[in-house]
Image: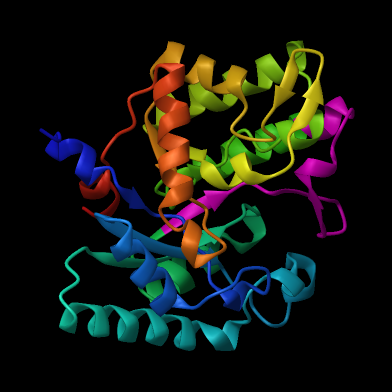
Amino acid sequence: MDNPENKKLNANYHTHTELCKHATGMPREYIVKAWEAGCSALGFSDHCPYPDEIKEKFWASTRMSENQVTLYFEEIKKAEADARKAGFTFPVYTGFECEWDKTIYSWYKDDLLGGFSVDYLILGAHWITEPDGSHLYIAEVTDDVNLLHQYIDQTIEGMASGIFKFIAHPDMFMSGWKEWDKEAEMCSKALIDAAIDLDLPLEVNGFGMIKPMNETSRGLRFQYPYREFWEMVAEREAKVICNSDAHKPELVIENARHAREFAIEIGIKPENITEEIFK
């Protein structure tokens, strides 16, 4: 007989839409595919917009604009209402995936969480803030130790802000770094220890599993989830959530299932943290 807890884990809280300019599909399509896949809970967390006056420093070409937030909410609510009429039963939540930059903390806390009243924010650590206020993609950091350390410090600062429910793809820095060396091990330990101290779940991200793999001296590795990082997570018993990071409707639950399979193989017991996220 199926374990009821396993059915509860058939969820995904990391979902994008075409509004971010690098995904396909709108909320209705994701909800239908999630229902077909036996979803237990679905969270939309598209990349957040930034204020118009500063958006060009915040990757405006791959983020929705500020004036699309209302459309984002309306599309999710309408799709959920139509799904309810059709007999769909799982809860649907609305949130944003945000990068950390301390200069826009008030935008996250007062505007996104306060003014727009989203259900949750997640920390997607994609970048390093540079001296001129622009942002460097972490996957482009391949051998600069100082930049890697700056990224880890900045990410931990974001984790400690108290406004995020979990950290997405915390091992994304291995996309560029690639080799599991002393620096990678030390940086991973710092991130994992911070997550444990802050009681903040770490996300095994299924989207990374369908990207081209990296060749390393230890063999092929996913860009993320990176095996050695998650073996350390398992050993230190940090909280773990598994998500799809879906950029296509057909992957809305499938990627999360692959992430859970990976986690279980490593020796991690993924958690059902719905109540924790939305309490």
Position of 226 compared to 259: left or right? Answer: right
Residue at point 75% right, 67% down?
59
- Placement of 242 over or under 41, stated as above or below: above
* Residue at screen point 48% across, 20% down: 233
Q: Position of residue 139 (x, y in %)?
A: 78, 42
Q: Quadrant of the N terminus?
A: top left
Quick check: 256 left or right of 127? left
> Does residue 14 sit above or below 151 in this rendering?
below
The magenta segment is 121-148
Q: Is residue 118 visible?
A: no
- Residue 72 x/y as whole percent: 47, 81
| Depth order, front residue of 276/270 | 270
- Residue 215 can be seen, yes or no: yes
Q: Position of residue 124 (x, y in %)?
A: 58, 50
Q: Is residue 229 above or below residue 18?
A: above
Judging depth in this view, the residue of 273 and 111 nearest the camera is 273
Q: Please check the rendered image and state whether residue 221 is part of the magenta-colored stretch, yes or no.
A: no
- How was the colour assigned to the protein in this rendering? rainbow
Residue at (81% x, 14% y) in the render: 217
Residue at the (17%, 37%) spot, across then down:
5
Q: Position of residue 11 (x, y in %)?
A: 32, 50
Q: Is residue 122 left or right of residue 189?
A: left
Depth check, front residue: 13 or 214:
214
